Amino acid sequence: MTHLTDELLDTAADGDTLAPVDAEHLRACVECQAKVERLSALRGQLAALPQTVATDDDLWPGVHGAIRARRRRRLVFTSSAGLALAAALLIAVVRIGNGPDAVPGGAEASVELAELKALAAPVVVEAMAASLTIYDAALRELEAFAASERDNADVQQRIEELRRKRAALLRLVSNS
Amino acid sequence: MVAFEALYRRHSSRVHAICLRLTADRLRAEEAVQDVFVRLWERLGSFRGESAFSSWLHRLAINTVLQTMRSTRRREARVMTSDDAELEDAPIRALAVEDRIDLEDAIARLPQQVRTVVVLHDIEGFTHEEIALMMSVPPGTIRSQLSRARKTLLQWLQR
């Protein structure tokens, strides 16, 4: 006689439906019935295990400390990201005020961004990426404009100002 | 933070039991409990009340432990020899005649994957399909691991 496999015995112990041929075997086989009974008893014991454990150590101070550390980190990153976004908006206003659509950021910005990704949280990197792209595009536009307007001191001043702000933005995230 | 501490006090012993049975290690379980509550603090806002809070928290605890186990396995796999890697599927070590153990000890002695399945199915009450999703393995694998776990537990407990 071929007995039920372990998995079929488990199926029966779990109260799930067996195929008719297997159910027929189980009804007739004392050996398989005994195995199912043992498995059912084990299931009962497992289900009756305590749902809670009493511990000697209070873990709350550790949990509290970890949460406070995360809060501090988040505060730093959030404020950095906020500043980066504010800078991006500021530059976007400058760019709009200075001419047509800009070209996308170049290799220099990509290298700096790769370095930043190793340092900063994703939200900061994302904000920085947007800010740097706008800074670089605005700078290129202004530099192109300055090439044809060599005596225009106002344009040169704006270029210097943008470069300073761009560098400050990079420093801000590097130090955060 | 006072309200969150109250939440912690109310649920920590249950979360601790889940973590302890899944990890079978007191220190790892304590680390897991801490991770679970830090995650809970971060994700409280995403609880939508679609299930009981306790069910949602227990699921969060299980996922946290499983994720840690996966990371540990990946890390260990980098330094494991092929012999070590086969241990999980190797026959479960028989106990010596003098080793009398209770059910909790027996569960703790099972290999990690097999233990996880029996804890989630027979103690926590998840279905094969739910466990398969949590562990990213086919339901058939869960069935065979559960069968292996129960057979081993019976052998150990009948000594």
Image (spheres, grey):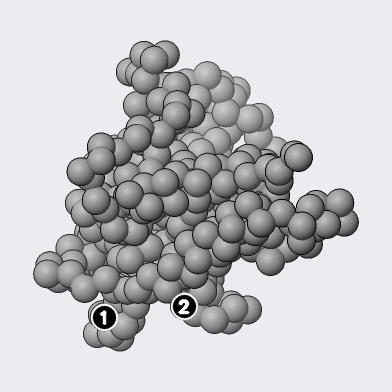
Question: How dense is the environment of label 2, judged by Cα within 10 Å: few (below 14), some, or many (20 and up)?
Answer: few
Q: Residue type at mark 1?
A: Arg
What residue lies at 33% left-to-right and 49% top-to-bottom? B159
**What's under tag 2, amino acid-wise?**
Ser
Q: Please tell me which residue lies in front, A94 or A14.
A: A14
Q: Nearer the viewer, residue A99 or B62?
A: B62
**Vertical order, A20 against B78 (above or below):** below
- Give the percent coordinates (x, y) of residue B83: 39, 15
As helix, strand or loop, the secondary structure at mark 1 comes to helix
Q: Which subunit holds the residue at mark 2? A: B
Instruction: Confirm whether residue A145 shows in the render.
Output: no
Residue topped by disc 2: B54
Disc 1/disc 2 C-alpha distance (Å): 13 Å
| Point 50% across, 50% down: residue | B150
Apparent side of residue B6 relative to residue B67 in the rendered image (left or right) = left
- Disc 1 is attached to a residue of which chain? B
Q: Nearer the viewer, residue A67 or A158?
A: A67
Q: Earlier in the sequence, mark 1 or mark 2?
A: 1
| Residues packed near mark 1 inside 10 Å, few (<14), some (14 to 19) or many (20 plus) | few
**Quadrant (top left, top right, bottom left, bottom right) of the N terminus of chain A:** top right
Q: Is residue B41 left or right of residue A154?
A: left
Q: Is residue A127 left or right of residue A75?
A: right
Please tell me if label 1 and label 2 are on a single chain: yes
Q: Which residue is mark 1?
A: B9
